[in-house]
Each structure stands twice: as C-alpha cells, then as structure tokens.
Image: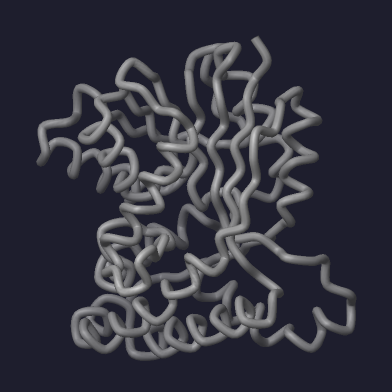
Amino acid sequence: MSRVSPDRPDIHYDSITQAWHYLMGESFHYGYFEPLDATLDEATRALTQRMADLGDLKAEHRILDVGCGIGGPALYLVDRIGCHVSGISTSEVGVATARARAAERGLEQRASFELRDGMANEFEERSFDRVWVMESSHLMPDKAAMIRESARVLQPGGRILLCDIIMHRELALPDVMMRAKAFDLLRSVFGRAKMATLSAYRGWCVGAGLEVLRSDDISDQTAPTFANWKQNTQRYRDEVIALMGERALADFSRACDELERMWEEKVLGYGILIAAKPI
C-alpha cells in the first residue's frame, strides 16, 4: 500500500503517481469541457491547448514548466508546438516518469525534467520566454515567491501562464470550521494546499512587476472533471486498490464529491491568469 504524506508534496505525489494514472488519465490536472461530453483526456488536452493559445506560444520559445507533474502538458507542447520545455518538480517519481515518457516518444532533446523548487528555481535571470504554472501553485506555501521567481527568469516581454484551483471568496472562520472535515479529507487525498482568489494572484503579479493581461474564471468548464474522476474509480477499481488500498480509493471518491459540492456552492473554482513582463 502506498505511503501518503499530505504535508510534503514531494512525498505525497511520489506515493500516488501510479494510481493517479488510472484515476486522472494521461495528465494530472483538470479538464476544460467544451463540449461537455468530451472525454477526460480530450478535456485535459483542451485545457493545455487553451493555456497555450492564451500564452501565444511559438516553436522558438523556451518554456519553464513549474510543477511539471509527470510531464503530460510539457510533452504536449513539445509535440504540438515544437518549443523547448524545462520541467521542474519536487517529486522524484514525477520527474523520473516524465523523463521516461519523453524518451519513449523521442522528445528528450526538447523536453528536460529536473528536481527543483518553483519558489527558488535557481535558473539564471532571463532564461525563458514563458513560465507555465499548471495546477501547482495551490501546493506552494509562498505563491508570491513563486511568481517573483517566475518573473525573474522571464525575458522582457515574456509571459507567465498560470491556471489553478481558486477560492471564489475568503471564508469567514465559522464557514471554515463548518467545512473542516471536508478540507481535512481534501488535504489527505490531494496534499496540503492553500487556494487563493484570482484577485490575490493578480496582486502578486503586479507586486512582481508584471502586467496582468487577463484573468478568467473557468469554473463551469472544469466542473465535469469530478464526474469523470469518479467514473474512473469504478472503471479501474481493482488496479487502484492494488496500488493504494481500498480506503484510499474510497477517500478519493468522497473527495470528488466534496469538490463538486464546493464548486456548486461557489466556494472553490478554477481560474486562468496571463501576465507579461514589461519590455
């Protein structure tokens, strides 16, 4: 049975990577469901493509993928657009998986993956044309530092492309206490996270000297993700139980229910933000 440590994103994701292949599909992120009857893999690719379109990605661009997971979006960008992508993660299993996937597809010359921290990436200044932050910022305790680091390594005129789970509003203490069990469940399944509002992300970008080009709420388009994840808990029940145990699978299913409820109640949602570094 897998070892789970929700307070350490690196250990947590090392422990669940294989099982999440079954539950979340080819990429460990939400889908953009337009049309609503799209498959999960179609929808996750659609979200990646939407980010790429909004970021105006070109073949000649060098991209830093902060929190690259198992490399799904990075390999998609290399394959579809032809750009160079450097993916970073604190998960050893994630990096190893991403490297293996790149090698299997013959893309290792354009897609590299390393163990680095997005809040202190240690790359040289002005090393990249785009910084791609797909569903990793909610796991970072210092989001302002991550955005400052991203701005530091951008070329003038470069852009940060960020999408993630967001808070629709700051919760008052009684509301937090009422939802304490639900938040504890989400932490145990998905790792320790702290979501922020789109307004907070805009403020951190401005504080880092960036110009916010757009920030879009796409909560409605991402909501079908949960039903698709739950379908996979039944479709791949035996495979997932063998990897992480029956209790962990049941918790994952219940966490999907809680997320769906929070989406409906406008507590949590999903946003995209594009910001540029002045020339």
Whether residue 216 can be seen here? yes
Percent x, y of residue 90? 47, 44
Position of residue 248 relative to residue 73, above or below, is below
Q: Position of residue 78 (x, y in %)?
A: 26, 31
Question: Does residue 115 appear in this view?
Answer: no
Q: Residue furthest front?
A: 35
Q: Residue at x 27, y 84 (%)?
A: 241
Q: Position of residue 178 (x, y in %)?
A: 79, 88
Nearer the observer, 127 or 166: 166
User: Observer-nearest residue: 33 or 239?
Assistant: 33
| On-image quarter of the C terminus | top right
Q: Is residue 123 left or right of residue 109?
A: right
Q: What quarter of the picture does the N terminus occupy?
A: bottom left
Q: Is 251 on the left-hand or right-hand side of 125?
A: left
Residue, x 48% and y 81% (percent of image)?
256
Which residue is at 44% across, 35% downward?
65
